[in-house]
């Protein structure tokens, strides 16, 4: 650093308010002096410029000065808040060696490792201890022994106990999802952070980083390449709070949104603007609209939490625009993300411990649900998710966190994400006379976490077919004319951002509460004596409250009304009538969704087991399979069902085969 600049830096760091800050930092045992870039700029523009252009020099000198003032080792200057950030995809050769600011989602954080700052070497010839300061990026040994009577070139032994270390961590950030509209692949940037800033952020955090962009040659010693890899040596990390998107809103936008709030048709206008190029599916569009607006989670005093995000599952025939709808939703949602359950690379849907190239150790990598924290994740081909994910997905859907305990990494990551999933049925087409659990290869426990499930069927219906064909053909003829929703995409996104930021609708309207209560009680009354199946459970009750609040937020109102409650009830009813029907009886049975086994099936299972018990007594310990099937059929249970049941129970060890063609219960 030039003497003049160094003098100015000395002066700056000796200013009274900074000395005062340093005393406080030392008292609290911290190691970092954080300074906003503006403060340097106000003090001396030239000095500020030298930070941007020669940051390594600047920061090393500053640390030296701070060490001199505080007499504490490892005191550091960290600079935050540059006026402009560089987009990760726009980092170029010109940025190498410069002080830059980047914004992104932390996707990976490595384990914290000790890094040597001062290594002590013992000379094998004379026993002298040589101290070597570890500056630069590579480990340094002494050239010759410091002992004037020795002075040999070693050999030396490293004395770990006398050496000094500091914390070191590698990490990786990726472009934030909202910068990736249109399905672009996110670009990434590696970084290294030291001392008291390690573990400042966890994967999934939206962060603003400042630091020096440095490069390291690629390839091994013998065949070094001309290309270099970029690593940001991080100076400061700021974890951005929810609401960074609000910066996108201008005062005119806000005025326009407030004007719209007075429009009595606001609800319809928003729903009609959902996936406008897709014909029909009004209920699904309403569900997605509500998902986009969402409501706040409730934190209870006992530490538990009721989620505010609504999860929606679409299933049904192929080619009914499921994928199209998912992509649209991910594109409009703030922090929206589209992914497929099948994608085998990376951390998948939840999180994973992966090998870290920079540190050579393990790192924690965030999956789709963590990256979309605070937004919406569209997950296509949900049924094809990896088995690691299907274990973790339950926690991430309900508690909205993911706990990772792998390869020495223990962490809990947030997944406060609304999930819009699409699943394809096992047999290609959706069979009308099978329940959803029988043909969508998803664990019923996972299925039960979705607030709304829609089955999209591709059935020929003359009147509708003509209208749809007409719509799609017109769309190809004049795309901009036909797809003219009441609210355009950008404005819709702004409304969503505004509502999510500024409104947390109250749920205290007496009439609304009574309506929901009545609905719940009435629908469950039919099942009271255990004869009829249970149509809904508390899960649906919570879902209704969530949807009612989301309805209010969508209207840009701060209070849920009885109408909001009714709309929520209707949507839940609609979803249950599609997906919650026991196809054996045609009756509504929540167990179709909750356990995968509707009451009729459970009744039949019990019945068959009773027949087996009776026959065991008659035939002396074991029952002939043919006889079981005959009796069951005479009581209206299909032989195929009996066969499947016997096979299943044999696998589970409840039944066994003492002789061919005979079965017996394992426990009598
Ligand atoms: P899926 O994921 O359900 O198999 P896709 O989303 O791939 O189906 O849809 C197949 C194609 O059919 C898409 O181009 C989609 O736009 C079109 N399509 C299907 N149904 C509709 C509809 N109701 N309105 C407009 N386009 C439709
Ligand atoms: Mg698809």
Image: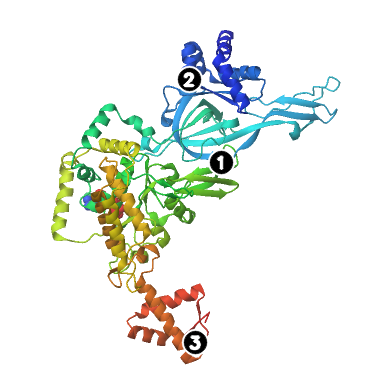
Q: Nearer the viewer, residue 484 or 288?
A: 288
Marking on residue 658: none
Left or right, 613 with reference to 310: right
- For label 1, being within 8 Å of ligand 2 is answered no
Q: In what element is the residue under mark 2?
A: helix
Please name the residue shown 64% across and 25% down the image. Answer: 74
Give the residue number, with chain letter if any, for mark 2.
Answer: 37
Tell me the quarter of the picture where residue 556 sits.
top left
Q: Are marks 1 and 2 in contact (CB under 8 Å)?
A: no
Q: Report if residue 317 is visible in the image.
A: no
What is the CA distance from the residue labelled 3 to the residue labelled 2? 84 Å
Identify residue for label 1.
Answer: 356
Going from N to C along the chain, the mark reached first, 3 or 1, is 1
Provide residue 545's location: percent of width, then percent of height. 33, 51
Residue depicted at x 41% and y 29%: 87
The residue at which mark 3 appears reads as 622
Instruction: Determine whether 553 is above or below 238 in the image.
Output: below
The residue at label 2 has a CB less than 8 Å from ligand 1: no
């Amino acid at each position: 650093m030039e003497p003049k600049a160094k003098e100015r830096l000395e002066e700056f760091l000796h200013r009274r308010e900074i000395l005062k800050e340093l005393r406080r930092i030392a008292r609290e045992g911290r190691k970092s002096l954080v300074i906003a870039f503006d403060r340097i700029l106000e003090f001396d523009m030239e000095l500020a410029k030298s930070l941007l252009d020669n940051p390594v020099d600047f920061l090393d000198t500053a640390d030296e000065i701070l060490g001199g003032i505080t007499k504490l080792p490892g005191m550091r200057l960290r600079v935050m808040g540059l006026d402009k950030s560089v987009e990760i995809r726009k980092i170029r050769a010109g940025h190498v060696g410069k002080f830059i600011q980047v914004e992104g989602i932390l996707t990976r954080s490595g384990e914290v490792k000790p890094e040597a700052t001062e290594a002590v070497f013992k000379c094998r010839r004379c026993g002298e201890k040589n101290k070597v300061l570890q500056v630069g990026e590579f480990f340094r040994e002494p050239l010759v022994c410091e002992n004037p009577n020795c002075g040999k070139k070693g050999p030396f032994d490293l004395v770990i106990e006398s050496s000094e270390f500091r914390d070191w961590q590698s990490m990786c950030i990726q472009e934030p999802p909202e910068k990736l509209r249109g399905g672009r692949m996110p670009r990434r940037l590696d970084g290294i952070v030291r001392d008291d800033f390690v573990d400042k952020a966890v994967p999934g955090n939206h962060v603003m980083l400042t630091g020096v962009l440095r490069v390291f040659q690629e390839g091994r010693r013998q065949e070094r390449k001309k290309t270099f890899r970029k690593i940001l040596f991080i100076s400061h990390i700021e974890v951005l709070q929810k609401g960074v998107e609000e910066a996108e809103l201008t005062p005119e936008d806000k005025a326009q949104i407030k004007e719209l709030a007075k429009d009595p048709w606001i609800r319809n206008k928003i729903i009609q603007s959902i996936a406008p190029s897709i014909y029909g599916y009004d209920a699904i569009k309403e569900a997605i609209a509500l998902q986009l607006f969402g409501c706040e989670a409730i934190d209870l005093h006992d530490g538990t939490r009721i989620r505010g995000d609504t999860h929606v599952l679409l299933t049904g025939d192929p080619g009914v625009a499921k994928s199209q709808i998912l992509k649209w939703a991910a594109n409009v949602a703030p922090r929206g993300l589209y992914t497929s359950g099948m994608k085998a690379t990376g951390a998948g849907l939840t999180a994973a411990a992966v090998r870290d190239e920079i540190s050579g150790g393990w790192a924690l990598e965030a999956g789709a649900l963590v990256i979309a924290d605070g937004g919406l994740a569209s997950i296509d081909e949900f049924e094809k998710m990896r088995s690691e994910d299907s274990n973790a997905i339950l926690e991430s859907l309900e508690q909205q966190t993911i706990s990772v305990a792998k390869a020495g990494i223990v962490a809990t990551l947030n997944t406060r994400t609304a999930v819009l999933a699409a699943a394809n049925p096992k047999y290609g087409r959706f069979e009308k006379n099978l329940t959803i659990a029988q043909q969508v290869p998803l664990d019923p426990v996972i299925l039960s976490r979705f607030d709304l499930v829609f089955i999209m069927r591709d059935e020929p219906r003359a009147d509708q077919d003509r209208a749809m064909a007409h719509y799609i053909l017109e769309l190809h003829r004049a795309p901009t004319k036909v797809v003219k929703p009441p609210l355009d995409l950008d404005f819709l996104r702004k409304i969503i951002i505004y509502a999510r930021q500024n409104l947390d609708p109250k749920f205290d309207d007496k009439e609304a509460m009574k309506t929901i209560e009545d609905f719940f009680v009435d629908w469950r009354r039919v099942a009271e004596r255990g004869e009829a199946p249970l149509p809904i459970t508390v899960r649906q009750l919570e879902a209704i409250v969530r949807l009612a609040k989301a309805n209010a937020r969508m209207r840009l109102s701060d209070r849920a009304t009885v109408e909001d409650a009714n709309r929520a009830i209707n949507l839940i009813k609609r979803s249950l009538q599609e997906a919650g029907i026991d196809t054996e009886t045609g009756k509504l049975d929540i167990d179709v969704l909750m356990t995968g086994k509707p009451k009729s099936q459970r009744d039949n299972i019990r019945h068959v087991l009773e027949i087996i018990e009776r026959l065991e007594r008659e035939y002396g310990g074991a029952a002939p399979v043919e006889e079981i099937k005959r009796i069951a059929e005479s009581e209206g249970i299909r032989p195929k069902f009996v066969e499947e049941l016997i096979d299943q129970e044999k696998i589970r060890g409840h039944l066994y085969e003492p002789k061919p063609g005979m079965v017996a219960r394992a426990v009598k």
